[in-house]
């Protein structure tokens, strides 16, 4: 089983890296880019077969390490 | 007061920190490896700057979950004095010993130069040798020192006097021009509610003797090290 975790900045938290990417896209001639937000994608290989337990485990991982919930949100997908 | 300096892989300011402690107190601090699960008997723990674990995941995130940090978190709850400088500050926020988080500098630049700080609160055990409103000159060297906290937390720490240092100009004005990294309210250093944990981005340990070009950082080490344990 695999867990796919997306960690993204909360709304309202400034993302200077996203801004720099938006600017570079503009320099490359990509018009119509209103905003860019950069986040992280983390893939975790899990040993068990119980998807519900896996989700709970990964949620604890997010709360304790993978995300800083002061500034970041996370979403979990078990596949 | 007996002191220990914590060493994580990727840290590079531990010697500067140890030297500052020795110059001010006359006693070398104990160096403590991150893998240890117990602290030696000390009254003060210093978490130095650098790039612990290569800044992987988030600055300070991995170090904050190391075995020695569990001992430091337990100790801090019982009144142990803790100072985190630069990466050390990031580690203490990641460990939730201090409020807020340090984000990328607003212009994405790594800034390495002397800056001025306004001593906002001189009534802490770390700043007693300074006077409130005093301007000091201290170097910074970081790419992620942009202090952020949600509106409610910010209001609370401002109200409780937890903001200890602010970036300022040479005259002590905490202006936007002096706020090179984009920190909310020019915040450069904070203490916890109990007042026994301090975190700051600038490096007072690099200005403790005339040989380093100034002694404005010395007051911080004198304040805490010469306090009765």
Image (cartoon, coloured by chain):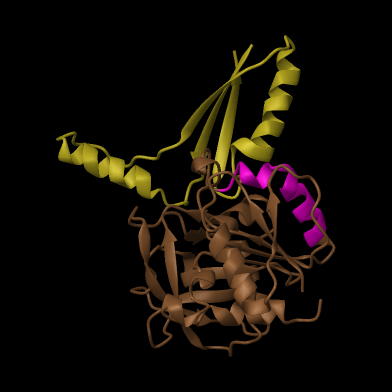
Residue A72: horizontal and vertical position, in percent?
55, 43
Q: Can residue B124 be seen in this view?
A: no
**Residue interval drawn in magenta:** B60-76
Kindly identify the residue that appears in the image at 26 percent across and 38 percent down. Answer: A33
Q: Closer to the camera, B103 or B117?
A: B117
Magenta stretch: helix, strand or loop mostly: helix
Kindly identify the residue that appears in the image at 59 percent across and 82 percent down. Answer: B219
Residue A52, located in which quarter of the rendered image? Answer: top right
Judged left or right of residue B181, residue B159 is right
Q: Closer to the camera, A57 or B199?
A: B199
B71 is within the stretch colored magenta: yes
A16 is within the stretch colored magenta: no
Residue B200: horizontal and vertical position, in percent?
56, 66
Q: Closer to the camera, B153 or B41?
A: B41
Judged left or right of residue B200, residue B179 is left
Q: The brown chain is which one?
A: B
Quarter of the image that includes the C terminus of chain B: bottom right
Judged left or right of residue B188, residue B198 is right
Q: Closer to the camera, A26 or B70?
A: B70
Kindly identify the residue that appears in the image at 38 percent across and 78 percent down. Answer: B175
In the rendered view, tell whether residue A26 sits above or below residue B32: above
Residue B124: horizontal and vertical position, in percent?
68, 80
Kindly identify the residue that appears in the image at 67 percent across and 51 percent down. Answer: B95
In the rendered view, tell whether residue B44 sits above or below residue B212: above
Q: Which chain is yellow?
A: A
In the rendered view, tell whether residue A60 sits above or below residue B180: above
Q: How many marks?
A: 0
Residue A48: horizontal and vertical position, in percent?
73, 12
Quarter of the image that includes the N terminus of chain B: bottom right
């Amino acid at each position: 089983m695999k867990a796919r975790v997306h960690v993204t900045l909360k709304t309202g938290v400034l993302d200077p890296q996203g801004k720099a990417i938006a600017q570079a896209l503009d320099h490359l001639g990509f018009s119509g880019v209103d905003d860019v937000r950069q986040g992280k994608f983390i893939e975790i290989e899990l040993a068990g077969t119980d998807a519900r337990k896996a989700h709970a485990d990964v949620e604890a991982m997010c709360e304790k390490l993978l995300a800083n919930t002061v500034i970041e949100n996370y979403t979990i997908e078990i596949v | 007061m007996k002191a220990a300096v914590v060493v994580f892989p990727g840290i590079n300011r531990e010697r500067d920190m140890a030297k500052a402690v020795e110059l001010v107190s006359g006693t070398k601090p104990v160096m403590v490896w991150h893998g240890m699960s117990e602290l030696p008997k000390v009254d003060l723990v210093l978490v130095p700057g650098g790039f612990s674990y290569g800044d992987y995941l988030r600055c300070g995130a991995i170090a904050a979950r190391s075995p020695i940090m569990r001992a430091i978190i337990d100790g801090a709850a019982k009144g142990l004095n803790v100072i985190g400088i630069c990466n050390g500050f990031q580690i203490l926020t990641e460990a939730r010993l201090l409020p807020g988080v340090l984000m990328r500098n607003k212009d994405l630049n790594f800034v390495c130069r002397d800056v001025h700080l306004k001593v906002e609160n001189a009534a802490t055990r770390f700043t007693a040798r300074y006077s409130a409103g005093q301007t000091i000159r201290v170097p910074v060297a970081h790419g992620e020192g942009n202090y952020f906290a949600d509106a409610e937390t910010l209001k609370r720490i401002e109200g409780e006097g937890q903001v200890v240092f602010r970036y300022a100009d040479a005259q002590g004005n905490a202006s936007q021009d002096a706020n090179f990294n984009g920190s909310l309210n020019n915040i450069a250093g904070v203490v916890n509610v109990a007042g026994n944990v301090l975190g700051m981005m600038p490096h007072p340990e690099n200005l403790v003797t005339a040989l380093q070009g100034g002694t404005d950082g010395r007051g911080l080490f004198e304040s805490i090290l010469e306090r009765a344990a």
